[in-house]
Amino acid sequence: MKNFQKITFVVLFGIFFGLLEAIVVIYLRQLFGSGVTPIGRQITPDDIALTLGFITFLKSSASSLITQSQWLLSLERWRELSTLVMLATLSFIAGKTIKEKFAYFLLVFGVWDIFYYIFLKIVTGWPAGFFEPDVYFLIPTAWVGPVITPLMVSSIMILLALFLLLKGSKKP
């Protein structure tokens, strides 16, 4: 039962962290006028370092397509790093073993990411669909692709986390 309570609170944290992240991104888009899509201009083949179809990694020089300046790009990278550190910190506190810590990180990351998109949709109407282009991360370079990719990856992370956390909690 204690494990269920901890899972519930980690999920709750993830939901509200997703809301906070969506609000920050909405503010940034309003302040810097990035419009509906987060990619400033179309990506050309010269901008691509590696593509896996569902995720495209841009060359470092092309990461500035996402922001209006190197300064903003640097701030965004610090914001992303801060997010990852906060999610990892919560996971470290919640879990007892390395396996639990990892599982809680998967859980809170997945919930946070899914609810980030849910709240963006509710508040702004974006994304219009699952295949709308988005920027996933800027560390170490820009990762871009359709919205469906992080939603699917996050769903898998949540299922794996629940499997790891609930597998050992059943007593005969």
Image (cartoon, grey):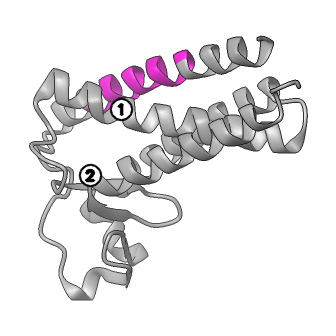
Give the residue number, with chain letter if any, for mark 1.
116
- Name the quarter where the C terminus is drawn: top right
164 up-or-down from 62: above or below? above
Read off the magenta span.
12-25
Residue name at image x 18 percent, y 30 percent: 121
Please, what secondary structure does the residue beneath circle 1 have? helix
Work out how far the residue at label 2 is from the one at label 1, CA to CA, in angstroms: 11 Å
Cβ atoms under marks 2 and 1 closer than 8 Å: no
Q: Does residue 71 appear to the left or right of 147 in the view shown?
A: right
Give the residue number, with chain letter if any, for mark 2.
147
* Residue 90: % across, % down: 71, 26
Residue name at image x 35 percent, y 32 percent: 116
Outermost front residue:
172
- Res. 26 mark: none
Residue name at image x 63 percent, y 33 percent: 87
Q: Quadrant of residue 168?
A: top right
Q: Does residue 118 appear to the left or right of 84 in the view shown?
A: left
Which mark sits nearer the N-terminus, 2 or 1? 1
**Three-letter amino acid code at disc 2?**
Val
Dominant SS in magenta = helix
